[in-house]
Image (cartoon, rainbow, N blue to C red):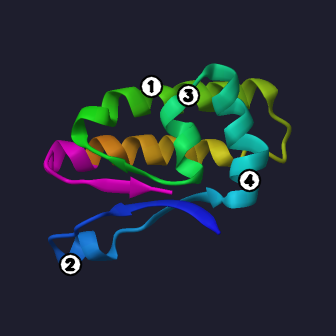
Amino acid sequence: MSISMFFVSPQTPEEKKFNLPVCTEDVFKRVVLPAAERVGAQYVQLFETGIEILADDTSAISEELRCVANQIEADASDATLYILPRLKNLQWELERIFNYCPEAVLYIG
């Protein structure tokens, strides 16, 4: 299994094709989840079971992703640093999507 982000009800061909992989379930459990727990990132912890994201959630989730990435970087070994660009890309895509389509509903899980 893996964690990825996609549109719940895609409206365009581009939205239908959109699927942003974040990490495998194993990497989430070993690297991301412990960091999320340490910084109290409640939304990020829900990525394991899945969560629908609305535009109103973007600021909080972006901040959580930033904090989780900082925690991973502080704790990291070379084996875990590769996840940082993926978390930053997820943060960037969330903001980009809701800037052009504020009524979108995304799913991360």
Question: In this picture, which residue range is highlighted in magenta?
Answer: 97-109
Residue 87 % position (x, y): 55, 43
Q: Is residue 101 magenta?
A: yes
- Residue 74's tag is none
Query: Left of 89 or right of it: where is 83?
Result: right
Q: Residues within 10 Å of mark 4 (few under 14, many from 20)?
A: some
Residue in the image at 42% along x and 32% along y: 62
Mark 4 and mark 2 lie on one chain; the one further toward the N terminus is 2
Q: Amino acid at mark 3?
A: Ala
| Disc 4: which residue | 27
Q: Nearer the viewer, mark 2 or mark 3?
A: 3
Q: Nearer the viewer, residue 50 or 23?
A: 50
Q: Residues within 10 Å of mark 1 (few under 14, many from 20)?
A: few
Q: Quadrant of the N terminus?
A: bottom right
| Disc 1: which residue | 63
Q: Amino acid at mark 4?
A: Val
Q: Nearer the viewer, residue 70 or 60?
A: 60
Residue in the image at 86% along x and 37% along y: 77
Q: Are dots 2 and 1 in contact, CB under 8 Å?
A: no
Q: Amino acid at mark 2?
A: Pro
Alpha carbon distance from label 2 to label 3: 33 Å
Residue in the image at 70% along x and 31% along y: 35
| Disc 2: which residue | 13
